[in-house]
Image: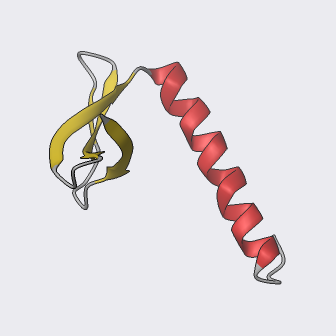
Amino acid sequence: MITHATPVRRDITYDHDEQQATLPIALHRLDGTTETTTLVLDPAQLEVLYAQMDRAIGMREAAAGHPA
């Protein structure tokens, strides 16, 4: 069973012809094993992820007492 996914420390890529971004991720299992795969995002999904990451960074900064 997969418990969570984390980004792999490699660059995201964008394929203009396919109109998709590809983010390498690692899938983590209950038994401690991992598997590397990719998260594929279309332009709309990429925009949503951008907005969500921006909000998360703002929340982290606010919790640390830094102005947003």
Place of residue 42 in the rendered image (x, y in percent of width and height, measured from the top left): 41, 20
Q: Is residue 50 above or below residue 45?
A: below
Residue in front for this viewpoint, 11 or 65? 65
Place of residue 59 in the rendered image (x, y in percent of width and height, measured from the top left): 76, 63
What residue is shown at x 65% (from left), y 53% (from top)?
Answer: 54
Q: Residue most toward the bottom?
A: 65
Quarter occupied by the C terminus: bottom right
Numbered marks: total:
0
Residue in front for this viewpoint, 35 or 24? 35
Place of residue 13 in the rendered image (x, y in percent of width and height, measured from the top left): 25, 41
Is residue 53 rendered to the left or right of residue 60? left
What residue is shown at x 49% (from left), y 31% (from top)?
Answer: 46
Is residue 45 rendered to the left or right of residue 36? right
Q: Is residue 65 above or below residue 63?
A: below
Q: Is residue 1 above or below residue 33?
A: above
What residue is shown at x 65% (from left), y 41% (from top)?
Answer: 51
What residue is shown at x 76% (from left), y 82% (from top)?
Answer: 64
Is residue 33 rendered to the left or right of residue 11? left
Place of residue 43 in the rendered image (x, y in percent of width and height, measured from the top left): 46, 22
Quarter occupied by the N terminus: top left
Colouring scheme, one of rainbow, by chain, secondary structure, one colour: secondary structure
Residue in front for this viewpoint, 15 or 60? 60
